[in-house]
Image: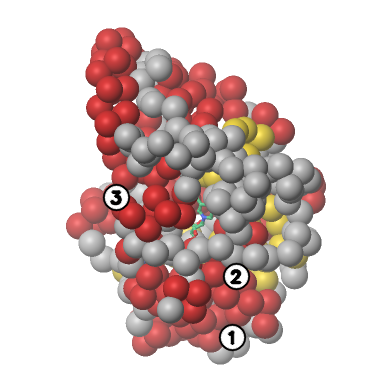
């Protein structure tokens, strides 16, 4: 047994920030992820002292060797296949999102001193959220009702964690954002955000605060708890405001098209997001350090001189994104997020529902 914290998915959005946080806190960190060139390159930028072990977590033998070799004091399990890419890779995603969780738990349970297991889950477990019929924010006790394969995988992984004899903590994350402008420029992500109902509710959170939450959850007095990780109340946003505000902070003022509202009379035609009651999580993890307005200011500062170029380009990007948007040329009054996901990627429903 070591004092090490093992972080899976360590080169992903949340993983990179979590590794940095743990390292800055003076913790011994082992980072694990797939052995691909981009991760080898990113590994060169890791804080000194962070150890890297490459492994494919869909292989139970590799998982066993990893866990027995490190014997960590805690595991932060972040590795996953997430939206929108999950929709066209359901079978691989199931192996990562559910199968790898099972393998990690089984390997960890065999250690002489079993580690604490901190599981990354998502508010996708609650399914579609029509704000007109669900006025209250989500709590840990809101019934689970996954609408898509992602929510179903996360609910299945949570069930495995709860059934395990390990000390566990489950963190259900809201919409994770970063002040690094480059992260917003992926076309698939912009297309995806553009198809979601503009008046859907979303509670965002700065990735650095998510990292704080995961680091704190390895030691906090929260064993056996399911905690909702969102930013403070300034992060209670409306879907259609988020990408345009971030883009505007980077200089792209008015550079994104406006999508469609959700259908107030169709509970199923909304996406997996809502506002959250984060009070218990904040009480035990003290993770909320970056408000939404502060994130926008920091994004603008980081964009620096590029803001002027992007400002000039805004009318052009709006024209391009308008033509590429999911509902371009369509006459329906309301957004159809699941239909638009199926048209672009694949049927988003969980395996059993789509057969
Ligand atoms: N980003 C969000 O808004 C958000 C919201 C809710 C929940 N979450 C959850 O938080 C966690 C981290 O999300 P993220 O945004 O950092 O995702 P990400 O896609 O940026 O990172 C996931 C990481 O998992 C790794 N991975 C995938 N398959 C693997 C395999 N077979 N073996 C080993 N590693 C593998 C990837 O290489 C990647 O580095 C995930 O569990 C996700 O479901 C994220």
Q: Quadrant of residue 233?
A: top right
Q: Pointers 1 and 3 in contact (CB under 8 A)?
A: no
* Quadrant of the frame with the C terminus: bottom left
Mark 2 vs 1, N-terminal side: 1
Report crowding for label 1: few under 14, some 14 to 19, many 20 or more residues within 10 A (C-alpha): some
Q: Which disc number belongs to residue 42?
A: 3
For marks 2 and 1, give the one nearer the viewer. Answer: 2
| Mark 1, residue position | 109
Measure the alpha-carbon separation of dots 1 and 3: 31 Å
Q: Quadrant of residue 323?
A: top left
Mark 3 vs 2, N-terminal side: 3
Q: Is 234 on the left or on the right of 4, as rendered? A: right
Task: Give the camera-side residue of 53 and 301.
Answer: 301
Is label 2 in a helix, a strand or a loop? Answer: helix
Q: Position of residue 119 (x, y in %)?
A: 58, 66
Give ligand 1's quarter of the image.
Answer: bottom left
Please name the residue shown 40% across and 85% down the image: 60
Measure the alpha-carbon separation of dots 3 and 2: 31 Å
Above/below status of 322 relative to 90: above
Please name the residue shown 39% across and 64% down the image: 347
What sort of colour scheme is used for the picture? secondary structure
Q: Which disc number belongs to residue 155?
A: 2
């Amino acid at each position: 047994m070591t004092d090490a914290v093992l972080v899976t998915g360590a080169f992903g959005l949340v993983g990179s920030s979590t590794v940095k946080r743990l390292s800055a806190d003076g913790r011994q960190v082992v980072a694990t992820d797939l052995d691909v060139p981009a991760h080898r390159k990113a590994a060169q930028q890791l804080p000194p002292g962070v150890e890297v072990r490459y492994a494919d977590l869909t292989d139970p033998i590799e998982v066993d060797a990893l866990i027995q070799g490190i014997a960590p004091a805690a595991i932060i399990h972040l590795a996953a296949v997430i939206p929108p890419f999950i929709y066209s890779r359901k079978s691989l995603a199931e192996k990562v999102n559910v199968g790898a969780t099972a393998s990690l738990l089984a390997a960890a349970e065999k250690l002489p001193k079993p580690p604490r297991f901190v599981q990354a889950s998502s508010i996708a477990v609650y399914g579609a959220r029509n704000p007109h019929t669900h006025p209250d924010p989500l709590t840990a006790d809101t019934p689970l009702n996954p609408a898509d394969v992602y929510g179903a995988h996360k609910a299945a992984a949570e069930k495995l964690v709860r059934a395990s004899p390990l000390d566990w903590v489950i963190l259900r994350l809201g919409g994770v954002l970063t002040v690094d402008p480059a992260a917003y420029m992926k076309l698939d992500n912009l297309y995806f955000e553009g198809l979601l109902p503009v008046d859907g509710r979303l509670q965002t959170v700065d990735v650095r605060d998510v990292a704080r939450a995961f680091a704190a959850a390895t030691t906090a007095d929260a064993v056996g708890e399911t905690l909702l990780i969102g930013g403070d109340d300034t992060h209670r946003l409306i879907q259609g405001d988020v990408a345009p505000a971030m883009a505007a902070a980077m200089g792209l003022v008015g550079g994104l098209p406006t999508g469609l509202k959700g259908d107030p009379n169709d509970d199923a035609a909304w996406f997996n997001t809502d506002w959250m009651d984060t009070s218990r999580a904040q009480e035990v993890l003290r993770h909320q350090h970056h408000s939404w307005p502060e994130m926008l200011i920091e994004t603008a500062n980081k964009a620096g001189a590029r803001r002027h170029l992007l400002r000039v380009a805004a009318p052009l990007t709006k024209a391009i994104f308008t033509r590429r948007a999911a509902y371009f040329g369509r006459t329906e009054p309301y957004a159809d997020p699941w239909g638009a996901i199926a048209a672009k990627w694949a049927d988003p429903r969980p395996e059993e529902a789509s057969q």
